[in-house]
Amino acid sequence: METIIVSVVSMALIIVSTLTVTVSTLQSANRLADAWKSMEQRSSSVSQTGIRAAAPDSYQGGLIDLTVQNEGNVNLNDFPSWDVILQYQAGAASYLTYAATYPPGPGQWAVDGIFVSGGSPEVFDPNILNPAEWMRVSINPSPEVAVGEMARIIMSTPNGVTSQCYVTRS
């Protein structure tokens, strides 16, 4: 009788542990598939995003006006989530925060306008930088770029696509 009880308990333990391992394996595979799908979506978004920032030919001080062209296939917005970094020739760098209104305050950047080719203001999808549109961005550096000093401006979209340009104060 004791051997029957031990056998039944052993069989129950084997069945429970097999079910536990099977369920854990299926849950892990499901999590892996979800992570893979998320990674593919992010990778697709990054590969379809492209921006090109261009600095002015001449800079005398004050606001730095850039043009940022959407060269990708993704509509870009959520400007508060963009990163703008100004790196000075001397080695210092400053992170600029987004200002919702123009002109930006010291240490801020703002969108002055979004335009279609030919320079006409955008009419469709206001405040969204659609493919082939460009925007004028004003940066208010703090501290000022010194006379004769070069600065690098790095812009990054929320999904991590970056562009950089250089400006020298004359």
Image (tube, grey):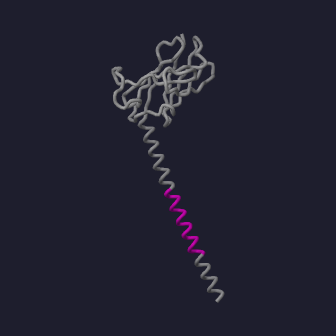
> In this image, 168 relative to 49: left or right?
right
Q: At which x and y percent is residue 117? A: 34, 23
Q: Residue at x 37, y 32 (%)?
A: 125
Q: Quadrant of residue 134?
A: top left
Is residue 44 placed above or below 94 in the rendered structure? below
In this view, the residue in front, 89 or 123, is 123
Q: Residue at x 38, y 30 (%)?
A: 126
Is 27 magenta? The answer is: yes
Q: Residue at x 51, y 28 (%)?
A: 155
> In this image, 117 relative to 7: left or right?
left
Is residue 146 placed above or below 80 in the rendered structure? above
Characterize the magenta stretch by its predominant secondary structure: helix
In this view, the residue in front, 75 or 170, is 75
Q: How many marks?
A: 0
Q: Which residues are magenta?
A: 13-30
Looking at the rendering, in which quadrant would you find the C terminus?
A: top right
Most distant residue in the front direction: 101
Is residue 147 placed above or below 47 in the rendered structure? above
Q: At which x and y percent is residue 21? A: 56, 66
